[in-house]
Image: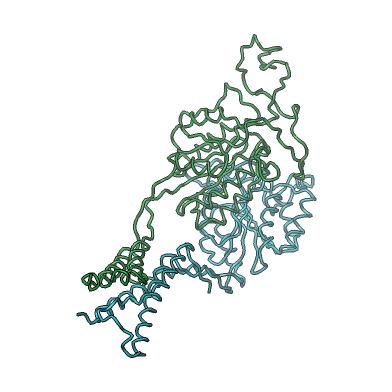
């Protein structure tokens, strides 16, 4: 007992604490591999993205609105040294607003740019997604940034299967992801007037329901009123459901396979983060991390040990 | 002074700094009954000091681990500079050379010239807030007014991707003017329009733009990248029948800008050198006194905390060796 009393554990404890502090000054930083991202996000701003089929607090919000909200939340949570570039898609092509920027340093700018995205930025009104994806891949094939192409897969006007985009030369040149936005049930597409006010929805007579470009892919003998020069698609008026829009998942999956990208559906932030983490999109990058807390914790433990109150222990034993 | 920590929950560890109040850290001595000894003021003071040292050491460690820092500050300064919105034409003709041909190896496309020279321009403007807007058929909001030059450069670099569609200059100007709405009125406010064409404005648009330019007190510079053979902004119509906005949109746009109640200057550039000259002119002209906020970056204080803790631990260890042992 007296040996225990005599043993002065304070000196070794203080020595360990001092040694820990020495390590703290010698090795303040450690290089750790941590996942970072480098994305170029291309957002579809065609009309069908105005369809409101994402439920929110009080009323459903549009696909574009949901995409913007989710992205803004996402960049707030991406690790520093990740980079985000931003682009828009409409018509047959996409354009880049800015090249990838570091998310921590340029957070305010990226956030403002995303929040200002509007369907009225569209420079033309068609929505040829396959061609748009092709132009995106072509534009970014030499970039080290990965593509996140966000769209609902609604081709307007419908594509003639004879003239599909050919991805063979660009397949697997770029890594990335097609994110499908929208619900699976068909909903109407809002229409806006010249002043930007909502003005009903597109009706069945407002949009073409089949492609009338080039040669028909059907057997001419099956087409009513076929004329090779004047009516290669026949004379019958076709009515379909192209005025309604739903997420064309099968079509987007097919595009993803053809272009060598992955496909995922955009639901909420948590699901998106999981997709990004598991989808091998993260780049393991050595990042200098502050590890001073480790020796500091040891020193703190030593000090706590020395000064830990002993109201009763020794007295009770003796 | 605004102090903050990175990890607030670590501050719970500050409770540990109270430990020395309950334990002097000196240990029990074989001489059991201290009360027999007369009270000694010096001893009380020394023992109190030792406890204080230990408390400070623990506090230093905890604050260091919590990441104590002084938050980013800003200081108001007077300098020379401006708030500039770059309004860039992304119409497809920008991808042609000044000779009006598709860009080949010998001659640069107008968009490439503009990109290169604007990059240099932005690099020179240290105190400015710069924003970027683009337009084609529709206006594109790119980067808000910011001192973050990297963001501006990234946006300018992105203009090397293929250009878009037509020229709808009034919407682009409206977008550019909207950038100033939430900004304090200090220094000069500039819209720097870089385009290679013009379009007729509707009278409605003209009226709105005139009001906005006046309200926001924005000065306008127009660098007109003129292709060979295309009409210029200073051209006089040879035939009076051509004297209308549809036939000569450049001339009419210039006239409209000249009638604005805010300063306006046009530069007609027919070659990369002329563009360089124009940008140098603007760089020289736009150095009015500007009130701006200088950012003082976040100051990390955790190193100071750790320094203090190290010193105190060293001191405690030294004192520990002074103890008389038997």
Give the quarter of the image for residue B284. bottom right
Reply above or below: A265 against A78: above
Q: In this orientation, which residue lies closer to the viewer: B280 or A123? A: A123
The C terminus of chain A sits in image quarter:
bottom left
**Residue B43 seen by the camera:** yes
Q: How many marks?
A: 0
Q: Is residue A265 left or right of residue A244?
A: left
Reply above or below: B95 against B79: above
Judging by colour alone, the chain drawn in cyan in this rendered image is B
Q: Residue B61: x percent and y percent? A: 39, 69
Q: In this orientation, which residue lies closer to the viewer: B51 or B188? A: B51
Give the quarter of the image for residue B93. top right
Q: Residue B260: x percent and y percent? A: 75, 60
Q: In this orientation, which residue lies closer to the viewer: B27 or B139? A: B27
Q: Residue A81: x percent and y percent? A: 45, 53
Reply above or below: A69 against B311: above
Chain A tint in image: green
The N terminus of chain A sits in image quarter:
bottom left
**Residue B55 seen by the camera:** no
Q: Outermost residue toward the left? A: B326
Q: Residue B268: x percent and y percent? A: 63, 55
Q: In this orientation, which residue lies closer to the viewer: A50 or A194? A: A50
Give the quarter of the image for residue A161. top right
Q: Is residue B269 left or right of residue A78?
A: right
């Amino acid at each position: 007992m007296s040996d225990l009393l005599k043993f002065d554990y304070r000196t070794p404890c203080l020595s360990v604490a001092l040694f820990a502090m020495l390590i703290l000054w010698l090795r303040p930083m450690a290089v750790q591999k941590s996942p970072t991202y480098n994305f170029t996000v291309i957002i579809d701003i065609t009309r069908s993205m105005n369809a409101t089929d994402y439920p929110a607090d009080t009323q459903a919000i549009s696909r574009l609105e949901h995409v913007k909200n989710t992205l803004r939340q996402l960049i707030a949570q991406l690790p520093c040294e990740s980079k985000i570039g931003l682009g828009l898609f409409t018509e047959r092509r996409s354009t880049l607003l800015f090249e990838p920027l570091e998310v921590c340093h340029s957070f305010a700018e990226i956030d403002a740019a995303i929040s200002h995205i509007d369907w009225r930025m569209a420079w033309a009104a068609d929505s040829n997604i396959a061609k748009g994806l092709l132009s995106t891949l072509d534009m970014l094939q030499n970039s080290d940034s990965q593509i996140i192409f966000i769209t609902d897969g609604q081709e307007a006007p419908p594509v003639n299967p004879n003239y599909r985009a050919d991805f063979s030369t660009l397949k697997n040149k770029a890594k990335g992801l097609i994110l499908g936005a929208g619900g699976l049930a068909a909903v109407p597409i809002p229409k806006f007037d010249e002043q930007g006010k909502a003005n009903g929805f597109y009706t069945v007579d407002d949009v073409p329901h089949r492609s009338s470009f080039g040669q028909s892919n059907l057997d001419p003998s099956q087409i009513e009123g076929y004329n090779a020069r004047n009516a290669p698609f026949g004379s019958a008026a076709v009515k379909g459901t192209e005025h309604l829009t739903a997420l064309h998942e099968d079509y987007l999956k097919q595009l993803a396979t053809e272009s060598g990208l992955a496909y995922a559906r955009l639901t909420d932030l948590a699901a998106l983060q999981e997709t990004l983490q598991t989808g091998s999109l993260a780049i393991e990058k050595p990042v200098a991390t502050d590890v001073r807390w480790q020796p500091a914790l040891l020193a703190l433990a030593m000090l706590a040990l020395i000064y830990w109150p002993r109201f009763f222990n020794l007295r009770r034993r003796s | 002074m605004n102090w903050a920590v990175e990890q607030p929950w670590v501050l719970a560890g500050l409770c540990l700094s109270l430990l020395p109040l309950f334990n002097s850290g000196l240990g029990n001595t074989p001489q059991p009954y201290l009360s027999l000894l007369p009270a000694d003021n010096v001893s009380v003071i020394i023992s109190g000091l030792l406890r204080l040292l230990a408390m400070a050491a623990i506090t230093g460690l905890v604050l260091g681990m919590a990441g104590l820092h002084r938050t980013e500050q800003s200081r108001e300064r007077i300098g020379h500079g401006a708030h500039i919105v770059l309004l860039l034409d992304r119409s497809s003709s920008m991808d042609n050379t000044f000779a009006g041909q598709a860009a080949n190896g010998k001659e640069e496309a107008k968009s490439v010239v503009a990109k290169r020279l604007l990059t240099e321009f932005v690099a020179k403007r240290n105190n400015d807030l710069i924003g970027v807007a683009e337009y084609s058929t529709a206006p594109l909001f790119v980067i808000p007014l910011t001192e973050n030059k990297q963001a501006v450069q990234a946006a300018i670099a992105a203009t090397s991707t293929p250009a878009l569609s037509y020229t709808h200059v009034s919407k682009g100007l409206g977008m550019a003017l909207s950038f100033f709405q939430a900004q304090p009125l200090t220094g000069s406010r500039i819209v720097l329009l870089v385009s290679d064409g013009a379009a007729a404005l509707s009278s409605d648009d003209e009226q709105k733009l005139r009001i906005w330019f006046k309200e926001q007190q924005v000065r306008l510079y127009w660098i007109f990248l003129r292709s060979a053979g295309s009409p210029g902004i200073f051209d006089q119509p040879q035939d009076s029948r051509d004297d209308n906005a549809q036939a000569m949109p450049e001339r009419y746009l210039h006239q409209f800008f000249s009638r604005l109640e805010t300063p306006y200057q046009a530069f007609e550039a027919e070659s990369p050198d002329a563009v360089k000259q124009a940008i140098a002119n603007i760089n020289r002209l736009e150095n009015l006194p500007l009130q701006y906020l200088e950012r003082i970056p976040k100051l990390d204080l955790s190193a100071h905390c750790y320094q203090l803790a190290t010193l105190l631990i060293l001191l405690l260890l030294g004192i520990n060796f002074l103890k008389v042992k038997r």
